[in-house]
Every structure is written in C-alpha cells, then in structure tokens.
Image (cartoon, rainbow, N blue to C red):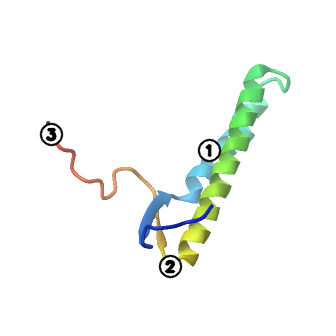
Amino acid sequence: MTLSSAPPGEVPVPAHIHYELVLQILEQVSLPALPPNSSGYQQLHSAVIHLRKALRLQKQFEEEWQLAGGSVEYQWSLNRDRPPSQSK
C-alpha cells in the first residue's frame, strides 16, 4: 500500500482494543460453543481470520501514515466529537 497525494494529517481509526475484544469473545466463547465441524463454526472461524487481517492492515496503514508524517487518533466511540447531524 502506498500513501500518496493527500498531505499527512490526523486520521481517526478504531482503537485496537475493539478488534481484540471481538476476537476474544469469538475465540473464547462463541467457537467453543459450536461443534468444530459445523458450518456455524466454520463461519465464525472465517470471521476471526478476517478480523485478524483487518487489524494487521490497519496497523500497516498506521505505520506507513506515520512514516509519511501523519498521525492517527484512536477512536473509542462514534459519539465522541461527532459533528451535529444536518436536517433536511
């Protein structure tokens, strides 16, 4: 991934703990509750793989963005600093 044209600035991203919490719930609670050969188990196992990949890609983005002079701001909630909604 190459970061280009946009000048480095602050980019809001999910805090890593959000990924970790979901992964722990899936791995420690959800998966053990299902038969290992079931389709539900396979679906959740696939979700775990995709979440790990998403976290890895986010970390890669953060590293590259920071090397380019930008910064990241970890978001803990959608409610924090949310702009007021516009009425139509």
The mark lying in front, picked from 2 and 3, is: 2
Assign the N terminus to one quadrant of the image. bottom right
- Looking at the picture, which amino acid does disc 1 mark? Val
- Say which residue appears at 60% left-offset and 64% top-offset: 2
Location of residue 23 with respect to 29 vertically, above or below: below
Residue at 44%, 64% (x, y): give it: 11
Q: In this orientation, which residue lies closer to the viewer: 21 or 10?
A: 10
Tell me the residue at 45%/56% (across/down): 76
Q: Position of residue 15 (x, y in %)?
A: 53, 59
Q: Which mark is residue 69?
A: 2
All told, the count of numbered labels is 3
Mark on residue 22? 1
Q: Earlier in the sequence, mark 1 or mark 2?
A: 1
| Mark 2, secondary structure of its residue | loop
Real-space Cα separation, disc 2 to disc 3, in angstroms: 37 Å
Quarter of the image for residue 43 reads top right
Looking at the rendered structure, the kind of residue marked 3 is Ser
